[in-house]
Amino acid sequence: MSKWLLRGLVFAALMVFIRLVQGAAINAWETKAGLISVTLVVIFAILVFVWGFIDGRTDARANPDPDRRQDLSMTWLLAGLFAGIVSGAVSWLISLFYKDLYVGGLINELTTFAAFTALLTFVAAIAGVALGHWVIDRHADDVPRQHHGLAATDDDRADTDVFAAVRHPDAPAEEAPTERHPQQP
């Protein structure tokens, strides 16, 4: 299972659970609807932030050179998009049987709510990743950076590498620039 899929499934399930709790809590305490909703969204963001922080620390420990680190932004963006779309669809499906759940129409759930969930997940996770990198990097010794590209067979990030589609599979990771000397007449 890819990293983004695992994170997407976990946070889709968490968002559906939060929306079920929100529906039950708002029906019990109608005058506190705003406070309940904000509190549940903050709890969701904190949990995403913690996972992002752990990812950032793990990545910084595994790769002291910042140029060699994983592309966690694409991982978390895909996870957020997946979590938003899946949780919106599942919440809408549950609302057909459980009328106390606060949902819009199917199109609204698959667009507006999915975009909100994706953005919340992405921003909280990337903030956690950045803090996790910083916590490790502030105590690390200076490591010389290597600027000669990544290996083309890096299977760990094959599903989130944005340049994989345009890179020829047999080409070297990065070609050295050739110098051209103009011929003198």
Image: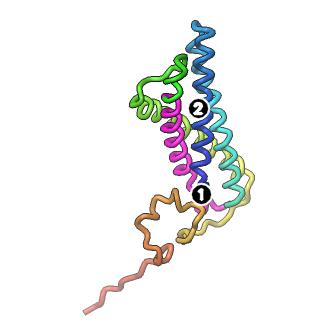
Image location (x, y in percent) of residue 114: 47, 34
Residue 72 % position (x, y)? 58, 51
Name the residue tied to disc 2.
15
Total labels drawn: 2
- Would you say the magenta stretch is mainly helix, strand or loop? helix
SS at mark 1 in the image: loop
Q: Residue furthest bottom?
A: 185
Taking depth in this image into account, of 71 and 142 the one nearest to the observer is 71
Quarter occupied by the N terminus: bottom right
The segment highlighted magenta reads 65-92
Going 62% across and 31% down the picture, which residue do you hit?
44
Give the secondary structure at mark 2: helix
- Residue 14: numbered disc: none
Coordinates of residue 125 in the picture (x, y in percent):
60, 41
Would you call the spot at circle 1 few (<14 residues within 10 Å), some (14-19), or many (20 or more)? some
Mark drawn on residue 70: 1
- Residue closer to the observer: 146 or 91: 91
Residue 35: quadrant of the picture: top right
Query: Do the numbered discs 1 and 2 sit on residues whose CB atoms are within 8 Å?
Result: no
